[in-house]
Image (cartoon, grey):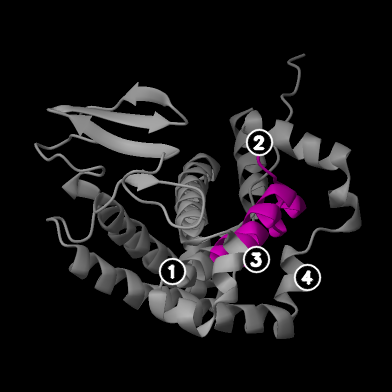
Amino acid sequence: MAGQIAKRGEAAAGAAPLIYRTKLPVRIWHWINALAIFVMLMSGMMIFNAHPMLYWGEYGANFDVPWLVIGHRGTSGYLAVLGYEIPTTGVLGYAQGTANAFPPLVTIPSSYSLAGARQWHFLFAWVLLVSGTFFLLYALFSGHLRRDLALKREERSLAHLWHDIKDHARLRFPTGEAARAYNPLQKIAYLAVLFVLIPVVILTGCTMSPTLNAAFPWLVDMFGGRASARSIHFLCALGFALFIVVHLLAVVLAGPVNELRSIITGWYRLPQARMVKESVQ
């Protein structure tokens, strides 16, 4: 009996090969992109602290009505969205003994400096733009976009997508040969980052620059004003933050050692399908 169990274990181990799944350009862009986005989010929060209100429209100023406010009353912090107020003391508005929208723990620099935050933000905006451009060219000309990221015909059906959503909700991740490629939800998330979040966050950032407004006045019209561009920029940043949280959670649940090995070395061990228990005679 013990021998049979050992053989089954050896067979299972032998049936879980290492495959080369993540190519070097993808791995390089992943880490550069991760660094750039983290620095931009943290420096962006410091920039937001200078005027922690968001508006829709042409300009946006202290006497306009904001749709989002992160503020404080004395030592009590609050988040107000569309007039609905949520107490956030210790997290937003007032935390770590400071009356800022975002606390020093999550900002760059950690002490208030609008000029310093802008320098960090603009530097890594260039890093994001240049690395994203090179990756897009690689994805187009190498076939990575068509082969690995584009949804296949069967994956575009609502039934297939709904089935994939249910599997993820039940923490049933792809196994065996199905784990060789990105699943539909991964593809949609990566395509959204590459073709929606990154372009829009760059364009709205340019819209908020007076120098670029003068050079490209159509940007202001495209987003309905600098105040609206700032709001959209903030929502894109929130989209990046949510993507990071979901991405890290998926890595932990799917097996962090295997996932990290794939994105660091390129090699990935195919997860095995669950074994069906044999009935005892």
Residue ID for mark 4: 147
Can residue 92 be spotted in the picture?
A: no
CB atoms of marks 3 and 2 within 8 Å = no
Lower position in the chain sequence, tag 2 or tag 1: 1
Disc 3 residue type (three-letter): Phe
Q: Is residue 138 depicted above or below 17 in this figure? A: below
Residue ID for mark 2: 168
Q: CA distance from mark 2 to mark 1?
A: 25 Å
The kind of secondary structure element at disc 1 is helix
Foreground mark, 3 or 2?
3
At x 72% / y 31%, what residue is drawn? 166
Residue ID for mark 3: 195
Q: For this rendering, which residue is in front, 280 or 26?
A: 26
Lower position in the chain sequence, tag 3 or tag 4: 4
Q: Residues within 10 Å of mark 4 (few under 14, many from 20)?
A: few
Give the magenta part as a residue range. Answer: 173-200
| Furthest residue toward top | 281
Residue ID for mark 1: 31
Task: Return the x and y of residue 208 as percentages of the image width and height.
Answer: 43, 67
At x 38% / y 30%, what residue is drawn? 80
The kind of secondary structure element at disc 2 is helix
